[in-house]
Structures are given as C-alpha cells and as structure tokens.
Image (cartoon, helix red, strand yellow):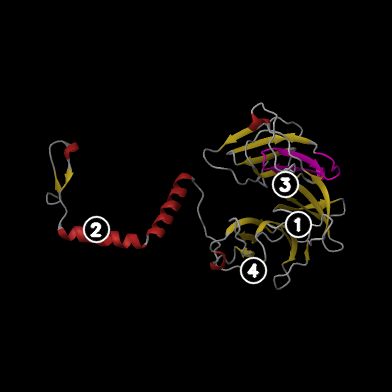
Amino acid sequence: NSDNVATSNDDNDKVAAPSTKEEEEDKKAQFEDDGDDEETANLTSTNNLVEQTHSGIELLWCFNSEDTMGKNVSCMSWNIKNPDLLAVGYGSYEFGKREGGEILFWSMKNPLHPCKRIKTSDDVVSLDFSSTAPNLLAAGFRDGSVMIFDIREPGHEPVLKSTHIKGMKSKHSDAVWGVNWIQSGNTGGQSLTSISSDGSVLMWNMKKGLEPKEIMQLKRIPNPAVLQGSSKVDVISREAGALSVDFFNSKQQNLYIAGTEDGIVHKCSTLYSEQTLENYIGHTGPVYAVKCSPYSDLFLSCSADERIILWDHKSTKPILQIKKDKDAVQGLAWSPYDS
C-alpha cells in the first residue's frame, strides 16, 4: 500500500511511512493496556520460553494458596500408596523471622484448594511419608524438632513429637534437613531416621513417644577440593553440618549416604556409629541432595558448586560429573522406571 510504505528500487532501503494520528493513539492505548497486565505478560512469555526450549514440557497447573504467600516451599513428599496426594512444607528462611510454618496436602483432583492443612509452630524443612503406613507423615523443623502426623486425624497436633530433656540428647539442636523412613529388619516394618546441620544422625524409637538413638555424629575433615593442597582447616565447630541423607535399597538397608556443608559426602552404616565407612571428595560447595540408586551400588550428589556427580559407593573416584552453568543444583531424583 503506497499510503503506508515508502518503497525504493533496493529492497534494503524499505522504510515505514510515518504513522497517522489515529494509529499513534491506538498504539498508546494498547501500551497502557499492556502495562496493566505486565505480570501476566511476563508469565506468559516465560511459559512460552519454557515450551520453546524444553520440547514436551508444559506447565499444567500450580498448587497455590493465599495463606502461604511470602513463605518458601521448603520440601515435598508424595504419598506412595496414594500417588495423587502431595504434602508440601512451607516456612521462612529469613534470619530472625520465625512466624511458624504450614503443611498443605494437595490432590491433583483439585489443584485449586488444599484438601488438608496443618499449622506448625516452626518452619517445616523436611517431610517423608511412610510407605508401610501411608497415613503417617514425618516432619523435620528448623528448631531441631521431629514430629509424626497421622493425616487421618483432624486438627494440627502430631501423634508423636520430640521433646527437650535436660541433660540428654533428646532432639536435634539445629535444623532437621532430612527425615527418612527405612525398612526395619525382615519384619516389613519401618524405622524413622533424621539428619541435621548439628552433624548428628538419629534413629527414633516410637514405642514410647519419640526416643532418639544417635547412630552417627559426623565430624569435619579437610576437603582437598577446596583447600587445594593445604591441610589446614579453620573450624568453628568440629561437627560437620549435614544437609542431606539417603539410604540404599533393602538389600543394603544399613548403608546410607550423607552430604555436608563442607562439600564432603560420607558413607555410613546404622550398625557402626564410631566413624564413617568412606568419604567422597569432589564437591567444593554444600551438598544439597544425595540420592541412592534403587537398582545398583550407584548414588548421585548435587551441590552449590553447580555440579552433579555420579558415584559408585565402592569407589571414591567419581564416575561422571555434570556441570550446570551459573546455577546451584538443589535437588535430583532417579527414574523409578528405568535404570
């Protein structure tokens, strides 16, 4: 259209003709409308980008609640017997801000409203459903407490909780970053274990309340990957701050892997509490997650150093390292269907 486009013999010299007054007003109105929906536009743009860069991955829905606005999603656990049920822990990580946490139970059948809510006095930092008693949910808290909830019961009170007893190790003294139900012998029952940044691994007796037994106290050791040849370690505490734990399958149920703030991964046994069985050196930052393979002797670790490392627990040499540019790796998982 000669009224809208000025042309020349050379296609590279094509330029748009000046807009009319009506067109300018239309653009201004459109700009104002777009400004009102800026957040929606940004979200749509982000979703489009995800769809373009990750073929086959599409956002289906979000579990959202007004009551949890401003709180961090700290942990999640799927119910093994009821795969539609997801427990999500909430809290705040801001220093000095202790407003309590929540556990919300979401179902894929109704993503708009949680089917159950449990309010807690402290921030929730770890969760794990029992596989043999799927109504039981273990929770670890930032103040070092461990609680067990029966999700069939109404209200917010746990059926079991750790208590502070003066003069004895009755609970953790720092945040409980991992709670795990593990198989107990050949009876088909389960025991509860927990790990904390106070360096201790506890196993809980549930016959008379929650009574802990310390099965390991992790000690800080030099990390050559960080020290680069120096053996000197500046320590404020001799205990290693533990951040993650996972147990091997039922054939090796006494063995477990623990990741620490110092970047060192330890292999331990519930049958031997004096010292670790092996130390794996490879990470240079806090190890946020470790996952044992359900099929073999392999395990994975991920860290703030932006790496994922594949290990065989029988060797201290990494099998494979994957580097993620400019992003700490916070979590990982093995496929339950394919080794």
Q: Residue at x 58, y 67 (%)?
A: 110
Say which label, 2 or 1, has the lower sequence index: 2
* Circle 4 residue: 117
**Spatial separation of the CA atoms under disc 3 and disc 4:** 27 Å
Q: Nearer the viewer, mark 2 or mark 1?
A: 2
Q: Where does the image place residue 141, in percent across and percent down from the top left?
A: 69, 58
Q: Is mark 1 on a helix, strand or loop?
A: loop
Q: Do the residues labelled 1 and 4 touch (CB within 8 Å)?
A: no
Q: Earlier in the sequence, mark 3 or mark 4?
A: 4
What's drawn in magenta, residue-wise?
A: 251-275
Q: Name the residue under label 3.
A: 245
- Disc marking residue 314: none
Question: Front-most of 253 and 66?
Answer: 66
Left or right position of 188 against 15: right
SS for dot 3: strand
Q: How many callouts does the rendering have?
A: 4
- Asked if the magenta segment contains residue 258, the reply would be yes
Quadrant in the picture for residue 305: top right
- What kind of residue is marked 3? Val
The first of marks 3 and 2 along the sequence is 2
Residue 209 counted in the magenta span: no
Q: Residue at position x 75%, y 57% from top?
A: 131
Q: Distance between the residues labelled 3 and 1?
A: 18 Å
Q: What residue type is labelled 2?
A: Lys
**Dot 4 crowding, Cα within 10 Å, few <14, some 14–19, many 20+:** some
Q: Residue 27 carries which label?
A: 2
96 horizontally vs 31: left or right:
right
The reply to whether the C-beta atoms of the residues labelled 2 and 4 are less than 8 Å apart is no
Q: Is residue 134 visible?
A: no
Q: How far is disc 2 from disc 4 in space, using C-alphas?
A: 47 Å
